[in-house]
Image (cartoon, helix red, strand yellow):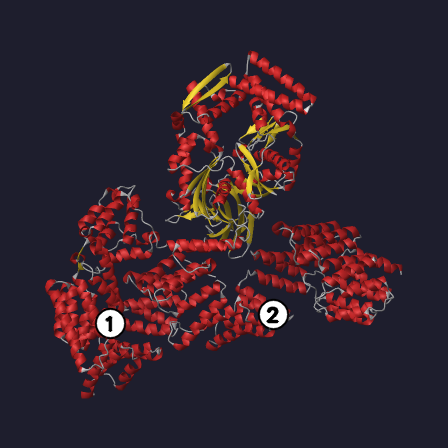
Amino acid sequence: MNIWDILGCEESKDKEYLKTAYRRKLKSVNPEDDSEGFMRLRQAYEEAVRLADVDDASVDESQDSALLKEMKELYKNYSRRICLEEWEKLLDRDEFVALDTAPDSFDALIKFLMEKFFIPKEIWKLIVDRFDIEDRAKELSEVYSEGFIEYVINNSVYDDILDYSLLECRDELVDKFLERYYNLDVAIRKHDYKSQIELIQIISQMDAYHPYFEMLKIKSKLQEQENIDKDNESSEELQARKEIYNELYQDAILLHSDFPEDVNILAICGDVKLLLGDYEEAGQYYDKALDIKPDNYGLKGKVAEQKLCMGEYAKARDLFMELLRVNHYDNNARASMIRANLGLIQELTKKRNDNPEDKKVQMEISWSLYQIYKFEDSLKVLDEFAPDESQICEYNNLKGRVYLCLRDFHNALTCFHNWKQAIDAIPSEDDSKDAEDKRKRYGYVHYLIGDCHLKLEEYSVAREYLKKALSIEHEEIVLSYEAICELEYVTENYEQCIAACEELIAIEKRSFIAYNYLSKSSLKLDFIKEAIDASNKAMEIYPYIAEPYETQIDVYLRFNQIDGAKAIVDRYQAMDIDSDRINYCYARILATDNKFTEAIEVLDKILLEYQEHSSDLENTIKVYNLKANCLDMLNQLEEALKVFEKVVELEPNHRTVYGRMGDILKEQGKLSQALEMYSKQIELAPSVVAYINRGNLNRFFHKYKTALEDYNAALKLEPNNSFCHSRIGLIYEHHREFDKALESYEEAFMNTADDNGKIQLYTYKARTLQCMNRFQESMDVYNAYIEEFGLNPDIAYDISELALRMGNVSYATSVLEDCITNFDFDENVKQCVIQLINILGDEGYLSRANEALQFAVNRFGKHAGFYAAMGAVFRNKGIYDQAVKHYETAVKLDIDNKQNYYSELVEVIKKKNPLRQDLKKYVEKALINPVEMTNPHAYIKMSRLNRAVKKYKEALSIIEKGLNIKRCAGCFYGACHDALYEKGLIYEAMKDYENARLCYKQALSICGHNALYEECIKRIEGK
Amino acid sequence: MIVGIDLGTTNSLIGYFDGDKAKIIPNKLGENLTPSVVSIDGDGTVYVGKTAKERKQTHPNETADVFKRSMGSTKEYELGDRKFLPEELSSLILKSLKEDAEEFLGQEIKEAVISVPAYFNDAQRKATKKAGELAGFVVERIVSEPTAAAIAYGLDKKNADTKFLVFDLGGGTFDVSILELYDNIMEVRAVAGDNFLGGEDFTQIIEQMFAKDKDVDLDELDVKTRVHVRKQAELCKLGFEDDKTSTMKCKIGEESYEYQVSLSDYEKACQLLLAKIKRPIERSLKDANIKLADIDEVILVGGATKLPIVRRFVSRLFGRLPNTDINPDEVVAVGAATQAAMKERNEAVREVILTDVCPFTLGTEVVVTRSGGYKENGHYLPIIERNTVIPTSKTERLYTAGDNQSEIRVKILQGESRYARNNVYLGDIVVAVPVGPAGQEAVDVTYTYDVNSILEVIVKVISTKATKKVIIKNEDNDMTDEEIEERMKALESLKIHPREQEENKLLMFRGDRMYEEATGDRRRLIQQRMTEFEAILDKQDKNAISKAREELKEFLDAMEEDM
């Protein structure tokens, strides 16, 4: 629900309306009754009011300081406003000088300018210089938005939207005029014809004059003509259009006569002439304008355009290339450059047809094709002729670069080597200009060769050539540095990479590559601040390239700052360009934020787009990888596996995918397949994690030797891995090599900082010590545990068992009571309750056991286990009525559960009345929900049921199986004493007292002290 | 039935909602106002209200008043050889009010709504609640006094869209609240105040003027005389009514003093106090984002607003005559009773919805990184800004400030200062975080402040998802249920003076005081009349006692006039 839904109203900035909506809703969410609902409503209301406030700053002039008043006065009076001296006077006022008032005055000025900004460039420059704004840009950006400070600085550098001094207008109309003029200018630049018409109409009705407005009117009309479909134009229409141009030219020339030195007006004269086809004259206007402003980028473009019209393709092309060197992203210039090249190719092709053997012309054609990205065509032309001796260098240069663009590095290498050899072959005494020119590119060719090797991932050769390239002076040395930066980065020499970047920056202040790699390497080395600074710089140089944004997103994600990362994505997307790399980052952010479904949506879109058009992603492997991980998190394991298979398809030797597939297979329970995957992972890229995973599986399959090997292999990679040590300990423990097990646990313990690991190890150690009958030491371990983590139900059960073995019944019960009183209910606490009841009962404290039961029921509610435990107590004491009652309650409470208590119930019913014959129906009922045979207790239950119906043989064979199955989780004993007890009961029922006694004795020896078993032995000895 | 109680610094009242309107319940003396004074004699008999106030003149060491000002602190009052906390003394007042109500309504009263100054902080509110519990009440709600006043005032104007300012100057505290009433919705827009400004301060000014004029060192006076001087100053303060001057008469030792004070002089001397009054008003208007001109009415609440000097100042301050339709002494109790009725969903008031605000800022301490990278401790980060509408829940994310920090300590603070140390410490929560570089680990701190003004703080570690929660209690004097029980038993052991003899006792104390003040023949005369009265009391003949009481009262009145 958005805030408007919550408020139940339309989106609005009308505060009265919002308040009414809020109050209406309030009647249904009284804070007295619905605190949550009210908080939601209130938050929505406050947010709506905040939004309404955003551009509703009220003005109260009476509060103005003298300074602010003066600023307003100055701005109001237009002739004063555009007068530099007036502003100088203002900035010289004491308020701007005196230490105590200067900061506030500056603040007031900046805030003033945020609203009143139609002032000439020279005044902006005055402000920027006076307050050192350019140098303080960063600091100021934090206070007043980055955008505004940038705007201030730009205003001081770029030309004004119009010549302020030429405006004739009443003061109170000035700002309205300027605003509308500005909008008109934008509308023309955006080719928004409808707005142009409206604005021109509105401005024309104003009592104001500015020649540029007249000029914009001409521009607008020219634009109108542009939209005409000139191909299907009749001759009358053509004539009419010419008429219009002629009229517009008259308007323009009139302006020109009034303002002969105005560059903009000169340019518009040229523009009209160009459209009239009078290229020469247009050229004259442009030249004159260029004389006045020789560096004007726009004018240069116009001149190039004029040359193109004149058919001077070579000249036009060179001019456009020059523009592109200044602004790489000027798409108009690029399009025109292509047009010029196309014209040039036509011209040259004609020439070649006249003279097919002219290799010079062919070279030029292929250059032009190369420049307009037609690499295949260029290659075709190059393949058609063999170069002259004098052309060898140029030929191989071009051909190699064509191959490079086609990513055919091997062929590229051949060409570059040819080129290099040609230079090598120049005799050293040759000092002709041609030879000198060729030698000048010796460094460049080394760079190209190095770059090819770099792309081929042949790093050491690449390094050799690039180092050489750096040692030779050449024009393109910057490229060599760039390649070195890349090389050091991809070979993970981050320190060297940083050094290379710094060298590069020293010779090329605005190198995108340098800052980009600097930031990426810094991040790798955890120099966070440096990484951010460098990536900011990179963004400043080429705002549209995704990489530095990626780096910053990485930084934010590393610190789990989702919002920060998102802001970077937003910043990039605000430029309205689509980058799959950024989209991928966005997906990563979503995944980090646990929004997996949304992440998958984004990733699918990337994959779709990748198939449809060229993308800035090198390949889709990481996209698939992330998608699979997201699916995994959503527990869609089958789908995740499929996606990982796609990765394998794309890159059979991927370094992590097999491990991940192993994880998923393991999660699915396909353990042998998982084992295979881990093996594959280890084969490709051995890692600690992979070894541990495989070791765990091997252990599961009881292949203890192989498991041990895996863990040891992992330890070779990471000698202090606590987990490996602890698992090795488990294996030793399994093999009853307790000393070794203890040693391993000790090792593991020393290396773990993680609480869960420690807790586990404490219990392992305690357990092993018990196996070695070192009870006091075992208890010491528990005490250390309690010292560190406090007593909790997880271990209370274990401690109570140990205490019993040591004969300390009161400690056993007090630990359990402690847990039951102080902890919230969970499975462990439940076990504590049961254990407590059992112990108390077994020791003969029937009423205390009953009290414990009542206490537990009062605290935690009724649980079958509680009643069953009490039932057992009564059973063992021979109070069968009570036992039946309690077991019946347990069965009732636990009716749907596989752990139900039928077997116990049947047993006591039988005890109560040994002659009962209708017990079979209980057995049948019990079998409806059969117990899963996963631990000894399940076997005990089954055996007991059989015993109840006197099927002693079945009972014996079941309990035998139960004794051979692995232990229950958390059991310390080598064998299950409960099962032995059951076995004893069976023998006793069969009247085989000797065997029965043996079983009871065995049971007793296992758990050390147990009142019940002692009693059994006494009983049996009596027989 | 839930009753509403105004537990004031000087006077307390109890009210109930009778069908369609709230009414004040008279005490055993038949008066609506019960002075917030407690006195205990040697054998543990407790006197409350006017009787206790009278007894203060003769037994200042066994009497306590103005203890509301110390509510929530650990200050102990010694009455004879017994020691009491402010909330215990308050509970005795409340107990007495409870008895009055039970007597009057003929039923047992259990639940109460009790009012406190809006600017009371968490500890003070909790202490008040405890006082209620000690008196045997279930405290259904602690309501802010100005809010209560506004409820009392606003209920008559059900459907108007009105903004009003409640100016509440009580005996010891000053509160300003701005409220808006619209279509049965009452919104508190802002509150501000001063817990140490009230009518008592205006009395003190007169006292000081007198001491200066007569060159008396007040600190050197014995307790009894000091109490007498204070009382005379208070009479003088109230004496301006029609006149432009008022006279303070008093006796110190054997010497009688008469001091005449002009209203304009008094006003001058009160300048500082009046200036103090202005500040909270300005702040509340600013917080509510309302211009003074938009306030439809100013409502005066609290006994001190009856003072001509205060009224004049308020009229000038607001440029209009304040509204006094409802008796300023009773308006809070009426409002509290109405709130009680709202709580009960009484038919007559069911429709009204009230939204209140949090009167102070709640925040935490943070480290601020200065440009240049050095870190500065002890800054205050507000989480719930003052005058936020409650219930409210706000979350701030805090990051580790140092490398390898293993825990984050979230201090819970209340107040408006930029520096943590200047704000009131309420408690803290410590959570463990995985170690790492500064800024890597973060916690979300959520403050939830509910309609009962109880603050709950939850800290959640982002990485481990571990969560800790505390409900803030006042550490200093927070009692467990058992302790309350114990205290209650202790208080019960005190004998409450039988209500039917209240008036007789009052007269006796008055006589005692006058005897002490008088000399010579007068003294003997009083002595004689008092002995006669005591003899009649002994006979236990109701009619005779009643008759004798009236006579003695007339006699004492005439004597006092003369003195």
Q: Are marks 2 and 1 on the same chain?
A: yes
Mark 2 crowdedness (10 Å alpha carbons): few <14, some 14-19, many ≥20: many
Which subunit holds the residue at mark 2?
A
Which marked residue is nearer to the observer: mark 2 or mark 1?
Answer: 1
Residue type highlighted by circle 1: Ala
Residue A421 image offset from top left, x and y in percent: 28, 78
Q: Where is residue B396 in the image (x, y as percent from the top left)?
A: 47, 52
Left or right, A99 with reference to A209: right
Q: Is mark 2 on a helix, strand or loop?
A: helix
Three-letter code for the amino acid on which mark 2 is drawn: Leu
Which label belongs to residue A697? 2
Question: In the rendered view, would you say B84 is above or below A687?
Answer: above
Q: Residue A333's mark? A: 1
Q: Give the quarter of the figure containing the C terminus of chain A.
A: bottom right
| Viewer-proximal residue among B521 and A904 | B521
Describe the element under mark 1 as helix, strand or loop: helix
Mark 1 belongs to chain:
A
